Amino acid sequence: MTARTRRAAVLAALVVLAAAPLVLNDYRSATLARMLVFALTAASLDLLVGVTGLPSLGHGAYFGAGAYAAGWVALHVTHSAPVTLAAALAMGAVVAVVAGSVAVRARGVFFLMLTLSLGEIVEQLAQSWSSVTGGSDGLYGIPPPEIAGIALADTRSFAWYVLAVFVVGMAALRCIVGSPLGATLRGIRDNEARMRALGYRTYHYKLAAFVIAGAIAGLAGALFAGLQRVVSPGDLGFGSSGAMLMAVIIGGEATAWGPCLGAAIVVELRDVLGPSLGGHGNLLLGAVFVAVVFALPGGLARLRRVAG
């Protein structure tokens, strides 16, 4: 596929996404917004997993921290969308700096377990810091964000708002992946020892990737808070982080749109079909995950290569 064809395909997809709220009902429009939120989060995780080679099980901590920050600001300071987004992005980055400064010193399974442990610590902090986070009840009654004094209260306008932030976030991630920083991160993924021998301070590059991924995840968390109007400690824990990693693997790591495809599948199976299957959406999702891992290890985004 040529670059021109890829650009045309991306533009066509964006046109379809922008037009979808005009024909979908409120429930499906909200589902579309949820898919876009989760897709942006999965894409940020792929910067660690696919590009840098750092499989993380604690990414929900940065997503949830951003959601809490945006919810708290909306409840106590201002409803302004730019302010809540900035607060969420900053909080995701701050939590990622603290966690990443410890985690990126480890490798392999030790890194995986460290990220899991750090995510659980952040979840427990949200549980216990009830004066700020609301404890086990979480933050609820979060007002919708406002742009130029206009509240994005209806589902259609909020879906367009989510789409706009999704496009900006994805564009930022693609620019980073295509930059010299992205090339360095891929070099670290492929052979970190050689990169160190060439004089690269790999710890700092990995920490930079960790912080960028955490900031984008926090941005997605702000969208989640505005969509759900409630944030709970469970949004920071392993259940959230595991679903994000599954989305990356199902869709295809280190691919442009694979994590987004995987995120859409996870939301559809777990949140949409799950209730109609008697609450067994996670069972179906697990079956799909196992099937993809064994039948197509590269993920669904690589089907075109297999077919070719």
Image (cartoon, grey):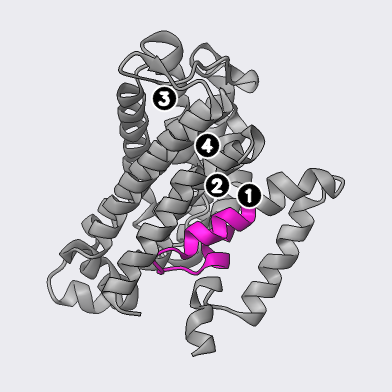
- Classify mark 2: helix, strand or loop: helix
Q: Earlier in the sequence, mark 4 or mark 1?
A: 4
**Of the residues shown, which amino acid type is indicated by label 4?**
Ile
**Of the residues shown, which amino acid type is indicated by label 3?**
Ala
Which residue is located at x 49 percent, y 81 percent? 304
> Which residue is outermost to the right?
278
Q: As displayed, is residue 261 above or below residue 195?
A: above
Whether residue 28 is in magenta: the answer is no
Q: Earlier in the sequence, mark 3 or mark 2?
A: 2
Circle 3/circle 1 CB separation < 8 Å: no
Mark 3 or mark 2, whichever is nearer to me: 2
Q: Residues within 10 Å of mark 4 (few under 14, many from 20)?
A: some
Give how far apart the Cα atoms at labels 4 and 1 are: 26 Å
**Of the residues shown, which amino acid type is indicated by label 1?**
Val
Q: Residues within 10 Å of mark 2 (few under 14, many from 20)?
A: many
Circle 1/circle 2 CB separation < 8 Å: yes
The numbered dot on residue 267 is: 1
Circle 4/circle 1 CB separation < 8 Å: no
How far across and how far down the image is residue 135, in percent? 60, 19
Q: Please name the residue that numbered disc 2 is placed on.
A: 35
> Which residue is outermost to the bottom?
308
Q: Please name the residue that numbered disc 3 is placed on.
A: 69
Q: Please name the residue that numbered disc 4 is placed on.
A: 121
Q: Is residue 143 visible?
A: yes
